[in-house]
Amino acid sequence: MRSLIIGLVLATEVGAGPLPPAAVAVFSIRPSQTTAPGEDPIGAANGNAADRCTPDERPDRGHWLYAPLAHGDDPAVTLVFLAGHGERPESYPDFVQAARENGYRVIALDYPNAIKQSLTQVCDGSDGSCYWKHRYEIAYGVEKGSAASHISTCPEESIVNRLRRLLIYLRQNHYPGWDAFTAWDAAKQSYRVDWSQVAIAGHSGFAALLAKHEKLHRVILLAEPADAWGSPARPADWIDGHDTDASRYYGLDHHDDQTYGVDIVGHVEMSWTRLGLPGPLQVYHPSTAIPAGTHRLESAEPVPSGVEPHFDIARNGSTYAKAWKYMLGKAD
């Protein structure tokens, strides 16, 4: 499965101009291509005079876009995938394949996820608001006092603006099938993201944060959120109160996830409880049926040599495709 999707991903990358209107299955668009006339450039090496963003906060590696593989009507929902800390958008081919087989159009979004330390390392556990300050700035480009981010000085680089500009670019350049995920904002005389048509999947990052502030179609939590503080540890302050209903969340983690020397699995499962994910925690086995109505899955499956459990649950399709497809549901 992995070799198949990598071959497809390498097939088409958009150059300086848009592709002709055609049914292209897999392609990439650099964030810098989506900048609108008169707006601050996205993914540029240098910004405006007040910009203090580093190159890592202005990635221009490329958004990757994938058409659905399942037959039938064009999906009314797109899946936006947010890679984990330091990972490239296209580095989860098995997960993307599972989503496409379930009928989703998929956007693997290029966003500022390469700060020198992970947020688990930046926030030392002494401040319950540390995580939210950083995540909100990265997601929305609004100053909240993060010590790890300068995104508020270049808000065009935020997750939400990058996604908005990409969807507008696809609409304006007539990419077939990609114009159903924006809505006209009469007050701003511009298109906005239609969050009701968006599912978010995140690996150890921002999916739950976006679901806090937007009403999403579905939320897939891969080893997230792990934001916790204090002794004994408790969920970070921001995890209380979400706009997306808890029934739309689905989570998967691994019993042995101790990434960065932190009890990631413990923090994640505390956060799922605080979020209100329905039902009990279920142990995941690839050969066993997942009970209907399950929203929380914990794996204890062995991992390949040299691979962290934290990454295996998001990348290993031979073990986890069944779990992913269950959590994703059909794109309808």
Image (tube, rainbow, N blue to C red):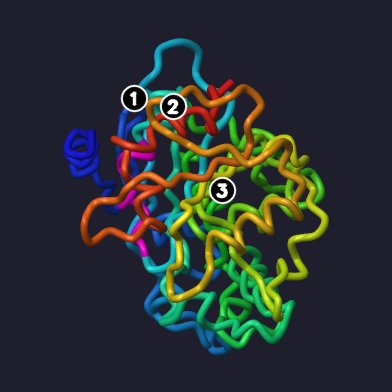
Q: Pointer 1: what residue?
A: 23
Is residue 136 something one can see in this rendering?
yes
Is residue 174 something one can see in this rendering?
no
Which of the numbered marks, if any, corresponds to residue 176? 2
Q: Mark 3 falls on what kind of element?
A: strand
Q: Is residue 126 above or below residue 140?
A: below
Residue in the picture at 54% in, 85% down: 51
Label 2 sits on what residue type? Pro
Residue 128, quarter of picture? bottom right
Label 3 sits on what residue type? Leu
**Frontmost residue, 303 versus 168:** 303
C-alpha separation, residue under disc 1 versus residue under disc 2: 6 Å
Q: Is residue 14 above or below residue 69?
A: below
Q: Position of residue 131 (x, y in %)?
A: 65, 74
Q: Position of residue 258 (x, y in %)?
A: 45, 67
Magenta residues, dominant SS class: loop
Residue 174, quarter of picture? top left
Q: Pointer 3: what residue?
A: 221
Q: Residues within 10 Å of mark 1 (few under 14, many from 20)?
A: few
Q: Position of residue 229 (x, y in %)?
A: 68, 77
Label 1 sits on what residue type? Ala
C-alpha separation, residue under disc 3 versus residue under disc 2: 29 Å
Residue in the picture at 44% in, 81% down: 117
Mark closer to the observer (1, 3): 3
- What's the magenta region? 87-96
Q: Residues within 10 Å of mark 3 (few under 14, many from 20)?
A: many
C-alpha separation, residue under disc 1 versus residue under disc 3: 30 Å
Residue in the picture at 43% in, 75% down: 260
Which of the numbered marks, if any, corresponds to residue 188? none
Q: Is residue 208 above or below residue 191?
A: below
Q: Residues within 10 Å of mark 2 (few under 14, many from 20)?
A: some
Q: Is residue 256 left or right of residue 5?
A: right
